Amino acid sequence: MSKLALNGGESIRTLPFPKWPIWTDDEINNLIDVIKSDQWGSIKGTRVNDFEKKYAAFHDAKYGVCVNSGTTALTLALRAVGIGRGDEVLVPAYTFIATATSIVEAGAIPRFVDIDPETYNIDVNQLEANINERTKGIMPVHFGGRPAEMDVILSIAEKNNLKVVEDAAQAWGSEWKQTKVGAIGNAGCFSFQSSKNMTSAEGGIILTNEDETEKYARSFSNCGRLPGGVWYEHYYLGGNFRLTEFQAAILDAQFDRYPKYQKIREQNCRILNEHLSQIDGCEILKDDPNITANSRHLYIWRYKKEAFNNAPKSQFIKALQKEGIITSAGYSIPLYTQPVMKNKAFGPMGASVDLDVDYASMELPETEKACYEEAIWFPQFVLLGDEKDIDDIVKAIKKIQENANEL
């Protein structure tokens, strides 16, 4: 008789994990206040402005500019620091597609760099080898909330006169050497999309300590206007990328709950690290004392099929899900193999654009290993469970290993 739920056996878990998003009467009351105020847009309202200041201050940044998505934030931040047509930006190939397409939207060219398998962040040891005369920027991704190695990145950027725009979409509250990410480089961008640790369904914010970067980012997000200017006077090529007062009301309600939930995530990650590190075939990511806070948007570990009867990652994932565990294989396609990148479909109606870069022939071994063979994720809301929830994850993995002959 089969033991694994994949083959008809009894599941380890039938109870649901914590729901997401989490909301209280605070969100409802804030939304009612906005409705009754008759000021629903940020132009005349106060909530977006107040939230920008609060969020920026929390991250030790001088300025915050709210926009309608994390993707928009990345594009506008690149433009605001001077990245433009024909420039190249170094970026990891193991990240969400928007990290790369935001570079294209800014008129620049993504130059993909492999990841460090111990961190899943951009491999800083490969940065300089990828710099050429067109390179104008680096976009490190604080992947899953884990800060990239900012000391090395900033040193290389300074040496080569490059701009640094941090993709901190998943890294709300993360710290590198006790400095919060997002304004360590020239600018940094966060997302408030539905899965994020703080969410208004959609939305994003650009942080910076630079006066000029804030000026351009704010103008680009507000149809090219300038503060104090005539309303129908437009100085730069911009658009309406503003956040609404409704979204700011929701975000403000969640702001003060962050420390509570973050403490739970951190505790559960420690428990998982302790247990998974003792299971053959489960490799946890390297510890780094320079990371003094991690948002833990994702718990990521490396699956070694040799310890599971050589079953491919996809089969292991199915078995784990059948045991009642919420998990995923994460990004299953390296960015340079995505159709839009491989075909350079950046023109009108997906027309190919002639660029001096051949994504179709790229091979980044660690990125491909993460996508196809090793990387397994647990989302942040799973990390909000209690000790029983985390224990079920460990039990399910052990059960699958003990019955790996069924995979």
Image: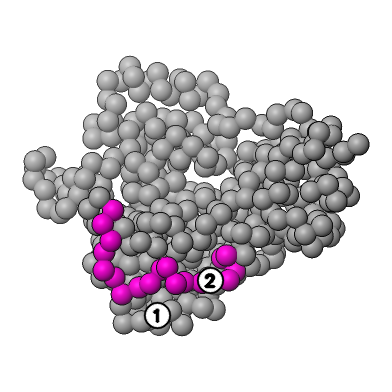
Please tell me how crowded label 2 is: few (under 14), some (14-19), or many (20+) other residues with Cα within 10 Å. some
- Asked if 39 appears above or below 173 in the picture, the reply is above
* Residue 88, image quadrant: bottom left
Amino acid type shown at disc 2: Leu
35 vs 281, nearest the viewer: 281
Q: Which residue is mark 2?
A: 364
Tag 2 and tag 1, C-beta contact below 8 Å? no
Q: Is residue 307 left or right of residue 293?
A: right
Quadrant of the snapshot with the N terminus: top right
Q: Is residue 363 magenta?
A: yes
- Asked if 357 appears above or below 261 in the picture, the reply is below
* Residue ID at (32%, 55%): 75
* Residue ID at (87%, 47%): 403
Q: Position of residue 209 (x, y in %)?
A: 36, 60
Kindly tell me whether residue 399 is visible in this rendering. yes
294 vs 297, nearest the viewer: 297
Q: Is residue 388 left or right of residue 43?
A: right
- Asked if 331 appears above or below 2 in the picture, the reply is below
Q: Is residue 17 magenta?
A: no
Q: Which residue is mark 1?
A: 131
Amino acid type shown at disc 1: Ile
What separation in Å lies between label 2 and label 1 (alpha carbons)?
A: 16 Å
* Residue ID at (55%, 27%): 23
Which residues fall within the magenta stretch? 350-368
Q: Position of residue 153 (x, y in %)?
A: 48, 73
